[in-house]
Image (spheres, helix red, strand yellow):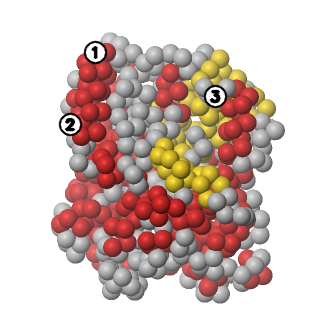
Amino acid sequence: MTIGGYAGKILRVNLTDGSWSTEKTSEELIRRFLGGRGFCAKMLYDELEPDVDPLGPENKVVIAPGPMTGLFLPSSGKVHMASKSPATGGYGDSNMGGHFGAEIKYAGYDAVVIEGAAKRPCYLVVEDDRVELRDASTWWGKGSFETEKELKQRLGEEFQIATIGPAGENVVRYACITHDFGRQAGRTGVGCVWGAKKLKAIAVRGTRSVPLADVRGALRKGRQMFEACFSKPGFKEWTPYGTAGVTDWINEIGAFPTKNFWTGYFEHYKNINGQALRERILVTDKGCFACPTPCGKYSRVREAQRCCYVEGPEYETIAMVGGNCLLDRIEDIAYANYLMDDLGIDTISGGNVIAFALECFEKGLITEEEAGRKLAFGDLDSVLYLARKIAYREGIGRILADGVKAAAERIGGGSERFAIHVKGLEWSGYESRYAPAMMLAYMTADIGAHHNRAWAITHDVAVGRDAIEGKAAKVIELQHIRPLFDTLGLCRLPWVEIGFELEHYAEMFPLVTGLDYTWEDLLLISERIWNVVRCFNVRHIPGFGRSWDYPPARFYEEPVPTGPAKGKLISRETLDRLLDDYYALRGWDKNGIPTPDKLRQLGLEELAADLQRRKA
């Protein structure tokens, strides 16, 4: 049968010899893994051997929209990018909005796979059936924004372009990919892998349509979904502030990262919240493809030495570059956001690493001579200085460019206690010593400490923040729902922020694809993908298991010193109880390894056999 929602082809590009080829998107891959994150996980599992160097030519990048990307339904502009992560050594992916994913579908591809490594800087041009690698020496060394602007001038405004900045070129292990002058594939260092491959940019233009199983039905349902979004009570409250609007609430419950997660309350939060953004720097709202609730805030800083336009800051940047580094002006955060975007540094990991360095300096673990200058929390110049040093791997930046885990191993002096990460990926914007479900969500997130797999902090507040019972079950439930959006090619924010019902997506899926899958069927596929990623980590990270799921000691030995969560922490014993509950419900063993029975139950017989063979 012909399955709707898919272009029908996968494009493979080999940077080593400049060749490219296409292959048919297999029906089995579609039926078992859907697209987006699912395609990324399964293809990388199948195609990468355990000894592959994340920065070597054998590593691959898979770029995959989903079956609903680029269609007439709310917020259908998402694309997934994945590789073996240089940040963690395991599976790494990042999700990006904008218009890039839709354009890949219109060009006729369900995925683009980047293989090999070029000898000289290059960029990839895809225009329907025309695929070319071109010399990028002109742009090597330039920032993300200038590169995108000049490539659009050369190729045409219709091209959708993704770029890396100097951080990616210099293989900063948490370098990001930038698109549409402010959308990022930020996490796990996929931009670093582009840099190691000498890939500066990808430009895509497509003119094809996407086949649908029921065109009229999908059009009718899509219109209904847009109308439902506009009618939601939360629509008018959410849109003006976007993600920056959660700043006040997070601070008021004592979960706002402050001074390298030393505490969870920032006294100057009103100077950096959504209202400050809207009143002092906002130019206009900015949405991604088909977005009815534009969370992007296009802003301008008008200060003598620091004048810029930037999309943001989003909440995560406000938290990690703002509160976590003690910057107390929205203008300062916006400028740091601009610089880090242009350099190609993930602002989540970047803000975390910079705050770690500031604490190391404050404690005397980094000297003024080693740093190259005095450093201080709350000092914008310190933040900008460190960002540049990291992007160009200069001085102290050579150590910090590898992330907090590796930096703490180099610096020593007990700094590993406040190197805030799990599995080598820096923690994002929620201090969780008084939020057991959110803590567990960070610990068990498959790519390392990231909030987008299970934003469970609202559940903590709703059912009681001291409660432990039932928290593991809720985290698993969210870990199946939220990544499913990444698989389908959709943004989850309408569901999360304005209460848009999940039933709409369940009703739309068969109209698009013709597959008679229920919502429960889709969640089962999401669970299957989750286990594939866990197995990838077992294969690729020596000794991977339970020990990789613990947070740093600050979170279970140091009570929160100030604010609404003062005196709170989650003991190591409680963390073990949470992990025990989680592993049992997942069907994994006590070490956090999926059992053969569980894998076979999920239809992953080949993974069960592979793990047993490797264990033997």
Q: Amino acid at mark 1?
A: Arg
Q: Which residue is mark 3?
A: 157
Q: Which residue is mark 1?
A: 216
> What is the CA distance from the residue labelled 1 to the residue labelled 3?
31 Å
Which residue is located at x 71 percent, y 48 percent?
Answer: 143
Q: Amino acid at mark 3?
A: Glu
In the shown orientation, is residue 29 left or right of residue 577?
A: right
Which residue is located at x 64 percent, y 60 percent?
Answer: 302
Q: Which residue is mark 2?
A: 503
Q: Residues within 10 Å of mark 1 (few under 14, many from 20)?
A: few
Foreground residue among 321 and 240: 240
Which residue is located at x 45 percent, y 34 percent?
Answer: 289
Disc nearest the viewer among 2 and 3: 3
Quick one: quadrant of the N terminus?
top left
> What is the CA distance from the residue labelled 2 to the residue labelled 1?
19 Å
Whichever of callouts 2 and 1 sits on the residue coming sooner in the sequence is 1
Q: Residues within 10 Å of mark 3 (few under 14, many from 20)?
A: few
Whichever of callouts 2 and 3 sits on the residue coming sooner in the sequence is 3
Which residue is located at x 33 percent, y 37 percent?
Answer: 604
Quarter of the figure with residue 415: bottom right
Give the answer, above or below, for where 248 lies relative to 486: below
Q: Residues within 10 Å of mark 2 (few under 14, many from 20)?
A: few
